[in-house]
Image: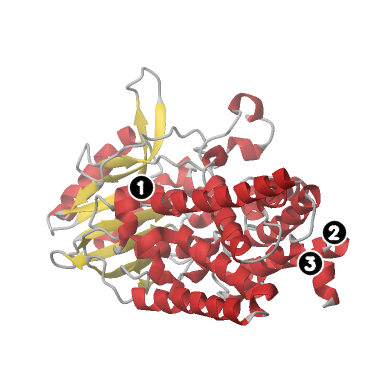
Amino acid sequence: MQWIDRLRGPGWLGNLLAIIAGALTTLAFAPFDWWPLGLLSIALLYQGLQQLSPGQAALRGWCWGLGLFASGVSWVYISIHVHGYASPALAGLLTGLFVGGLALVIALAAWLWARWLRPAQPGWLACFGFAALWVAQEIFRGWFLTGFPWLYQGYIHTDTWLSGFAPIGGVWLLTFLTVLSACLLSELRLWKRLPHAAAAVALLLTIWLGGKGLGVIEWTKPTGEPLSVALIQADIPQSRKWDPDHIQQTLSLYRDLSYGQGPVDLILWPETAIPVLKTQAQGFADAMAANLAEQGTTLITGIPVDNYDTGELRIFNGIMVAGAEENQYLKNKLVPFGEYVPMEQVLRGLIAFFDLPMSSFSRGPAVQAPLEAAGYRLAPFICYEAVYPDFAAKLAAQSELLITISNDSWFGESIGPLQHLQMARMRAIESGRWMIRGTNNGVTALIDHRGDITARIPQFQQVALSGWVQPREGLSPYLRWRSWPLKIGVLVILLTCALGRWRRRDEY
């Protein structure tokens, strides 16, 4: 067991193993889907923090986070270099700072574990406590500085038996169960004593077989007739998207592809498909809506929405039902640097990356109504918004369908769009609703209420996706309560761990 001692002890070898373990997690997500590596990765980190001081644990956690984010969000380099026009060296530096900054969240969690929460002896409380801490750091990471809710452990299990728990507690419940499973499987002290080993086997079987059993439950039910839909994937290069010389060609392309679909209930264009402010494009949009309405078709499109209500120009990233003035949604969760620039007065003008087109969007209201089209309510999410679990659940609870539009051109030919698709599928599972997902260059897909892709088209092609979606009604437990029961449970477990540490210190 010499390798376990090296893993648990301080020093460069343990930190190197932590970097490798963090990188293994990326292979558990889409498009690789080697989900057992996710369990192995967490188990290695859990064991690697058993005997470290708080400072040593923070470094170990940072190394694990470095491995995860350097491999899992490497597509950020493409966004900065290819589309942000930064030199390779500068793009590499900015990507490194981003990855290193995200890893600090894992370092903080590891420090808290070693300083305040880790029980004196490994065992049941340690396993539950570490799982609770991991959920807490994911929730924190999805909130701090507007959040980066990417690479949550629960997404690894979109296609495993554990997905049956998603309608009950969302992706964070899956995170808790997978981290708990990893810790239990690696906790040798439990497996050496028959009563504890039997209890561990019973708990693991309850978790995994329970997820399989829950997966057959229909939490929602169909309502009304299926809708025919057509999703236009125009594959407009990012370099041409906002070029005034190509705007007419872009609009003509969307027009021609749409008219070629024939009568359908809904036609969807992706995020900012109309690269013109709404007041300037209103005539075009209304004309399209009127022509399509003659065959019973409703057009929904992404468009930048300009507003002068405050006396000054504000521009929102919006989605609207064309031809209906007030039937629109304004994006609330904005992407830093892509849609707004933090510390704008300081950073604007320093490098081209801080001056990207349409990087001055205003934030839409926190409370907005769903879109209404074809007689149903559609919960709209624009790109990044679909990766915020509780945010998405609030709108989904008011709808019969989910609709998300995106422009994943920023990812290039990386794993980013496939990770994004995996998170969108989780939103469908949590809510028990079909999702219509339209993108500029992929992945454009129709997702059913169980998270299965019923239709999709290849990336990087100018093509339309035609298919059917079934509106559904009713609330899954997660839509009804969202993550509050889980958060309360996590808090109770962490307080129990902290109280145990405090009592132990008081004894000495």
Residue designated by label 3: 17
- 243 horizontally vs 471: left or right: right
Give the mark nearest the N terminus, 2 or 3.
2
Q: Secondary structure at mark 3?
A: helix
Neighbour tally class for label 2: few under 14, some 14-19, many 20 plus, Cα within 10 Å: some
| Vertical order, 215 against 402 (above or below) | below
| Vertical order, 484 against 126 (above or below) | above
Residue designated by label 2: 10
Q: Is residue 463 visible?
A: no
Give the mark nearest the N terminus, 2 or 1.
2
Neighbour tally class for label 3: few under 14, some 14-19, many 20 plus, Cα within 10 Å: many
Residue designated by label 1: 302
What kind of residue is marked 3?
Leu
- 17 horizontally vs 205: left or right: right
Question: Which quarter of the picture shows residue 443?
Answer: bottom left
What kind of residue is marked 2?
Pro
Residue 317 point in image, percent of width and height: 40, 40
Residue 438 point in image, percent of width and height: 37, 59
Which of these two is toward me, 74 or 264? 74
